[in-house]
Image: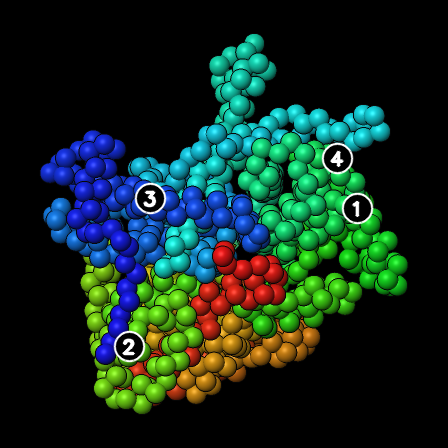
Amino acid sequence: MTEITAPKSSLTSGEFTDEIREQLKYTQGVTPEQATAADVYVATAAAVRRHLVDSWMKTQHDMVNGDTKAVGYLSAEFLMGKQLENALLNAGLTEQFEGAMKELGFDTKDVIDAEYEPGLGNGGLGRLAACYIDSLASIGVPAFGYGIRYQYGIFKQEFDENGKQVETPDYWLVNEEPWGHVDYNRDQRVNFGGEVVEENGKRVWKPAWAVRAVPCDYMVPGYKSGRVNTLRLWTAKSYDEFDLLTFNKSDYLDAVIPKVEAENISKILYPEDSTPQGKKLRLEQQYFFVSASIHDAIRVFYPGEKNPDLTTLPNKIVFQLNDTHPVIGIPELMRVLIDEYGYDWDTAWSITNKTFNYTCHTLLPEALEVWPASLIGELLPRHLEIIKKINEQFMSELKAKGVADDQIERMRIYTDGKDASVRMAYLATYGGSYVNGVAELHSELLKDVTLKDFSSVYPDKFTNVTNGVTPRRFIKLANPRMSDLISEGLGTDAWLSDLEQLKGLIPLADDPEFVKKFAAVKQANKNDFAAFAKRKYGFDIDPNTMFNTMIKRLHEYKRQALKILAVIATYADIKSGKVDPDTLVPRTVFFGAKAAPGYYLAKQTIQLINNVARVINNDPATKGKLHVYFPWNYNIELAQNLIPATDLDEQISQAGKEASGTGNMKFALNGALTVGTLDGANVEIRERVGAENFFLFGMTEPEVSALYAKGYDTKGLSREYYEKDPQLKQAIDMVADGTFSNGDKDTYKDLVNDWLNKDYFMTLADFRAYMDIQAEIEETYRDPMKWARMAVLNVANSGYFSSDRSIEDYLERIWHTGALK
Ligand code: F58
């Protein structure tokens, strides 16, 4: 007997309908007859929130009054995606919602679609934060997500008539946003600028200006856990009275400058790591949310106490630094403890050290933040003093440990001299208890390369936590058909909170009936996606082709260029008659990617992909055989629709560059096969799903290093690959000769120049291996049962990649806490 235990709340569908009616009436001011889908969405959100309030309050009460340490996840990004469906699922209200919509005469889809997707993150890092707060709540660990409520999220991407990316602002707050609760009574003051003076033998910061940090709280319901955590996002406001006092003698415009400046802090999410103009505002953002959050945590855990015993802080909360963006929290907590609460340096250091841990998400040296000391001095003079002192203490500690002078010099947190600067990754490594990478290979490379000097002195600080994704959003909501089939196969839906149970599907890979059903689910998802893409983008997609997808930020290291060159090469073979198109597996290639606005080569690559799509899709020679689509504005909604419909997923970064990847996990869990390099979490995915169920190609990280050592990028060795491989040569020549630019030979010249003279990420060197593996993929795909069987085995063996497991690893290896009792 199949026992499906869908999470059910005690609320009946009729009661939920009444609740929605009330909200429509008293909050929206409309009758059910007048209501639009958008009204019903807002009312339903309010009803869900109302339903969750008691659990939310109880969770907060238990957190503060119990002895379970909480987690404070400090992150500049939370890429949450749409909330309604997820909240309904986790709160156990899905069925009641369906019933209510029937009663009120609305289509559930219209109501769900009425939500505007918030884009408060750039990509993997921000989405990981969102998965982690879902898992924390689902496991029942008390936690706060702390971040910024940007007024504008990641830009909206459009393509112009030449296929170029155009960025437009994403004003996501244009309509009512029913999930956040703005709490003006829990605000925090955040100071900036000014100077530090000596008063009674003490260093005293006299700030020049301040902003008001106002929290907006989002409930984070756990799946079936009965726990509801908080995502607290800060908005910057000005202190009007302060502005008027200072500015009431000048004209009105001058008087609002401070207000505009203050509110600018939470105005917009940064789409890249470093723009020189943006540096100051970026540091202001970081300090703004971190300072507010630290003070907030003290307020929450020591309610009403004037002289709290903050030596107990590490038993109450542990802060996880999501990359270097919140690392200014380390000197901030030191400052708070010493200046605001009167602790001595050593006590403050011991508390701080125990309270923070740092997750690194990159291997690209340019992504590790380094701040000019002058900028920190200007905005946060007291913090600069503290950082210098931390650096001095660090240097002496290293000396005492007998570390060689040249190594000590390399490890400086604060570098002296004309261009004095502060290395945030080093500050985080020294200032916190643990440092983790986000996949095994990444953590190894962190230890052996990026932070080698540190791991040699502090080996015990270093650990790994391989990333994960939430199965609630990325399987259950994104792929309801497959979820039902899994539950049918396993006889339970308990796998949704214990994903390793997917292993129970392994025997079913040898059951042709099950495999057929699995293939039928994939086909139905492809049909759905074709309809979705028609509606949303106007694309005419043939769902009876192989769906081959590459969705992720556009970056040279991820090598979208390799994929598009391979597409061009196949196209060229068809055009030249070298290949009979009827012998090819019909294929639809999808790209989804945003490029940072200032990233020139990435934007050229987008333009190239769009124009390759234009040329190929309009060429009768490839009709029905090869098509390319680039749906614009890749976001969570597109991911949820495209991933379940994909047959073949591309994870083709240069080995040693992708820290982990999380898209790779989502695809494997949705029954796509991966073509990939031995990079990031691909390594672990392949280990688990089995080498025979993964299409591996390309150089390994040591091979990449060896090729750099030969001077690949400095001596122009890529040209040799171009000269030696006629297929590669032809593809590049077509880009150069204007085939994809209406005959203009200049359009892609910088891209072509880069390939032929530098090619830092070794696209050309991996091209042949990539073409060869594609041939193997085609052969496999021709046997649908074989392909589907491999896909089932991918799903069955990917349970490890649940973010619940990642959180369990953090709990055990880093946070040393657990679920509320
Ligand atoms: C990503 N980093 C890694 N950074 O590239 C990816 O391998 C990993 O799976 C993921 O983190 C989660 O660990 C990432 O997404 C950013 O988005 C930057 C944030 C700051 C602005 C520039 C982009």
Residue 767 visible to the viewer: no
- Measured as percent of width and height from the top left, residue 107 is found at 16, 52
Query: Of the residues shown, which amino acid type is indicated by label 2?
Result: Gly
Q: Alpha carbon of mark 2 to alpha carbon of mark 3: how far?
A: 32 Å
In this view, 113 is above or below 182: below
Seen as rendered, the residue at the extreme top is 249
| Residue 749 vs residue 426, the one in the foreground | 426
What numbered label is drawn on residue 346?
1
- Which x, y percent locates residue 722? 52, 77
Question: Looking at the rendering, which quadrant does residue 635 occupy?
Answer: bottom left
Q: Which residue is mark 4?
A: 342
Residue where numbered disc 2 is placed: 491
Residue nearest the viewer, comparing 535 with 620: 535
| Residue displayed at 28% across by 64% down | 6
- Residue 5, image x, y percentages: 28, 67
Q: Amino acid at mark 4?
A: Gly
Residue 248 against residue 63 in the figure, above or below: above
Instruction: Identify the residue position indicated by label 3 in the image.
Output: 49
Query: Helix, strand or loop at disc 2?
Result: loop
Q: Are marks 4 and 3 in contact (CB under 8 Å)?
A: no
Local packing at callout 3 (Cα closer than 10 Å; few below 14, some 14-19, many 20+) is many
98 sits to left or right of 665: left
Q: 694 above or below 86?
A: below
Q: Which callout, 4 or 2, points at the residue further toward the start of the chain?
A: 4
Q: What residue appears at the point 36 percent right and 67 percent down from the top-left corner?
A: 496
Q: Amino acid at mark 1?
A: Asp
Q: Earlier in the sequence, mark 3 or mark 1?
A: 3
CA distance for labels 1 and 2: 57 Å
**Rounded to the nearest whole Å, what is the CA distance between mark 3 and mark 1?**
44 Å
Question: Quarter of the image containing the N terminus?
Answer: bottom left
